[in-house]
Image (cartoon, grey):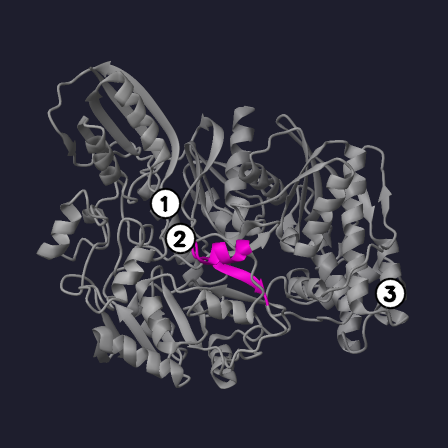
Amino acid sequence: MQRLRLEISGAVQGVGFRPFVYRLAHRYGLAGWVSNTSKGVVIEVDGDTEVLAQFAQAVLNEKPSVSIVQNISSKYLLAAGYSSFKILKSTGGKREAFVLPDLATCGDCMLEILDPENRRYRYPFTNCTNCGPRYSIINAIPYDRPQTTMSRFRMCSKCRDEYEDPYDRRFHAQPNACPQCGPHLELWDSEGIILAKRDDALIRASEEILEGKIIAVKGLGGFHLITLASSDEAVRTLRSRKGRKMKPFALMFPSISLVSEFCMLSHGERESLQSPRSPIVLLKKRDDQDSGMCISKLVSPSNPEYGVMLPYTPLHILLMKEIGEPVIATSGNLSDEPICTDEIEALHRLEGIADLLLVHNRPIARHVDDSIVRIFDKKEMILRRARGYAPLPLSMDEKAVSVLATGGHLKNTLALSIGKNVFTSQHIGDLETVQALEAFDEVWSSIEALYNADPEIIAYDMHPDYISSQRARESQIRSIPVQHHIAHIYSCMLDSGVRPPLLGIAWDGTGYGTDGTVWGGEFFHLTGGTVSRIAHLRCFPLPGGEKAAREPRRSALGLLSELFDDPGQHLPSGAIIPAEMAIMKKMISSKLNSPITSSAGRLFDAVASILDLHQTIEFEGQAAMALEHAIGDTETDESYPIEILELAEKPMVIDWAPLIHGIIIDASNGIDTGIISAKFHNTLAEGIAAVARRVGEKKVVLSGGCFQNVYLLKRVVQILEKIGYKAFIHRNLPPNDGGIAPGQVMAALMMNSEK
């Protein structure tokens, strides 16, 4: 007889791990105990050596499906003489256990809420250890009910029996509740007056949605604004009230079968939609849709894709069952503001937007938006990382000092390293408003408090004007600035598990360079701990500076001024009126508020302007998206010429001048815009391959918002593979600025290790 002690780290709390171990121990006839700790789960069992080995193997092989075992250590000791197997109370200590993301309703719970004979029939807060809220309700680790926002709800005797029964799937399901003892719904008017309660509130809300009303629905991690997707009037009203003229709205469908009627659906896309993570998945619209239902063209104008999700909570399932057709389910906020989480706050912030509010009395500990993914090469690529994914960490090779990173200005997230793990917060958003900055501060406090962290270093973007960077510099902790695009490269390295030597390519809209110019089309050579900028796209001026990000015509004029004495003649008629043209030309010639940029994103904008796709835009990336979408089903391997300038003791320059001349000639000859766009993308991919050949590193890391472009990414991956190189891309972290913070952590750790 011996005693086996297993210490397990990872996502092993709130997933039914302890009752699983309890049942397993009884199967093998073992005595001992299991307990949650601040680091994970600890198990001790007495038994025969051979049986103990079988038990340990079964722990790994049969663990709960939603759990993640990162590390397991085992130790054999003298038998302790245990007489039975028990589940002990949780213990404290330094917090390293994973907090599980919020998970979509499981099949068992879904059957219960649809079964008239079940006591949870139509109960919108049904959950078990396999599903339901986690991250959005937890206040502290270990994950126990008193440390969640469910602590105010005292379980009835039936729920308590489930909660205490190791053979019940609700054993220690912290949000466990029922209609008698749990949260409930209320329907409010815009003044906060209660119009209906419980199931009546849900039914009335669905009726109002079917009438074309806009309802603010308090969900898992915040509010959605929900209205009929089929009604032009409802969609037009929502756009007007929310201040969102063109940006596509997300859709929620009642069923996967209805999704397949409106969208092309691959096996991977179907799996992602129906997974416990239940993200928004970008799907191609069907041309042959023959359903009796319709979706307004105003939902996703001038875009071949829909952002689609399935109902992922009992509340959404029941609501969509009543409505029976697709709805818009967009974040409950004004543009550039974080999502609302509190019903009283929503009354004020959503005043004038929502006609009614469907609310509940379970508090939300932290805002958690819907995640967004697309399927690339049969696997998920995360574009916005929040519900279902955050805050699960990515693992480093070695333990290191604790670093907190404050991210960038757009698509902001924060990241924190503890031991070997890098935890990335949920999506916060663009730090453009007072509310967004408040959310940033709340997430900062929350992520430190949740892990009882005491970071030794704060990493931040070196842009002098970013609020996130200012907050970092104001702290009393040692701070390390990290160049924006270097952070991108380290983010993808962490994501893909690749290490130097390698070639890193970071293409995006903007980032403050070490030389004071605006970078964005960068190539880096990483060897050991050294990072060298070895190439970049040819630079051009941006008249108006930051304004160019919203006006592609400014990027076009700046770029054309590098090639022509009269750049305006190569812009579409009316793109810039004469008075504005004179001012912009003077700005360029006098170098007044016309920063120099190497940005790939602004190059995309310039070409979109030259082809008259967009002269001004409403949301980030709109012009580049239009340029990609213009390709449509065009298939061509043609490209334009591009030149690589190799300068003595300076980075190589990828000169786009021949490319732009070719585009102008094709456009003047009436060549189809789709063909021009395809040739443009093909040329950029060939330029990347040309630089890769010159550097000679077989591992190539691709990061930055430009690599959300599926056509470009696919082309680059293919051409690199063709010449014998391996491309590493983002999967678990966004390639856009949502992945900057974990990259800053990795870069700061590298810089710290060199000192």
Q: Position of residue 736 (x, y in %)?
A: 58, 51
Q: Position of residue 246 (x, y in %)?
A: 58, 73
Say which mark, if any, is on residue 664. Answer: 3
Q: Can you say which quadrant of the picture contains the C terminus?
A: top right
Mark 1 is on which residue type?
Val
Q: Circles 1 and 2: CB distance less than 8 Å?
A: yes
Q: Is residue 31 left or right of residue 473?
A: left
For numbered disc 3, what is the local secondary structure? helix
Q: Is residue 294 left or right of residue 15?
A: right
Picture quadrant where residue 528 is located: top right
Q: Is residue 55 left or right of residue 271?
A: left
Q: Residue at 43% of width from left, 62% of height from top?
A: 338
Among all residues in the image, which is located at the extreme left?
A: 157
Q: Indicate whether 179 appears above or below 423.
A: below
For numbered disc 2, what is the local secondary structure? loop
Q: Residues within 10 Å of mark 3 (few under 14, many from 20)?
A: some
Name the residue nearer the viewer: 584 or 610. Answer: 610
Residue 702 visible in this rendered orientation of the protein = yes
Mark 2 is on which residue type?
Pro
Name the residue nearer the viewer: 697 or 178. Answer: 178
Sequence-first disc among 1 and 3: 1
Q: Residue at 21% of width from left, 24% of height from top?
A: 45
Q: Position of residue 250 (x, y in %)?
A: 49, 68
Picture quadrant where residue 46 is located: top left
Sequence-first disc among 3 and 2: 2
Residue 535 visible in this rendered orientation of the protein = no
Mark 3 is on which residue type?
Ile
Q: Which residues are magenta?
A: 267-284
Q: Which residue lies under the disc numbered 1?
A: 66
Q: Which residue lies under the disc numbered 2?
A: 276
Q: What is the C-alpha distance between the residues marked 3 and 2?
A: 49 Å
Sequence-first disc among 1 and 2: 1
